[in-house]
Amino acid sequence: MSFKHIVILLISTGMVMGCGSIAKNTESRLATPSQHRSYRHAIPQDIIKEDTDTIKDRLYSRYQEWRGVRYRLGGASRSGIDCSAFVKIIYETEFGLTLPRTALSQAELGDEINQEELEAGDLVFFKTGRHSWHVGIYLEKRKFLHVSSKKGVTLSRLDNIYWRSKYWKSVRI
């Protein structure tokens, strides 16, 4: 089955939920880390050479452009967007890297790192329910950029009581 057919199937059954829940039987059909090996350490060399301040500046610029865009489960545009679509769009426009569509698939990429090692551009993941995940992009000083279901595109802190309790892992792609 082609990627296009899988996407159509997921959309038609309402399972494209980058930040939301996912049906129990869907989990087994998700891509495994080995299917995403091509993403490991795939950030282009010109981006690797950029310093952290430049990456932060680029991410803050994207935040200013998207700030307040409302959350919409399965959304992928300025009329409504979810967390994984937002991360996917930012990575494509800023780093030229195409990521998978769901937070869970994005969590399978790159190398897991400790919170103390976070740098601008790293991904932070949260387990928000039994079968739901959330993703954001780390900026600096324990702040991350993401799409909140209440505030839309916003900045939050890792040490916020809610996010601290839901934190799952961090990944460097």
Image: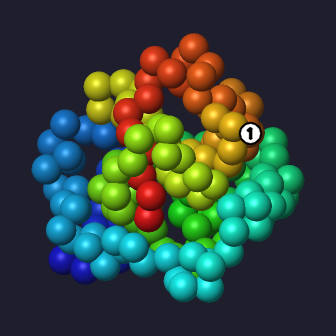
Q: What secondary structure is marked by label 1?
A: strand
On the image, the x and y values in percent for residue 49 come to 62, 79
Q: Is residue 172 above or below residue 99?
A: above
**Left or right, residue 43 beside residue 94:** left
**Left or right, residue 38 beside residue 75:** left
Task: Say which quadrant the C terminus sits in.
Answer: bottom left
- Residue appearing at x 19%, y 60% in the figure: 32
On the image, the x and y values in percent for residue 44 come to 53, 83
- Residue appearing at x 50%, y 38% in the figure: 116
Amino acid type for the residue under numbered disc 1: Thr
**Left or right, residue 7 beside residue 77:** left
Q: Which of these two is toward me, 45 or 82?
A: 45
Q: Is residue 166 above or below residue 78?
A: above
- Residue appearing at x 38%, y 33% in the figure: 168
- In the picture, residue 96 is in which quadrant? bottom right
On the image, the x and y values in percent for residue 123 come to 50, 51
Q: Which of these two is toward me, 32 or 59?
A: 59
User: What is the residue that sits farthest to the top in this orientation?
Assistant: 161
Q: Which residue lies under the disc numbered 1?
A: 154
Label total for image? 1
- In the picture, residue 29 is in which quadrant? bottom left
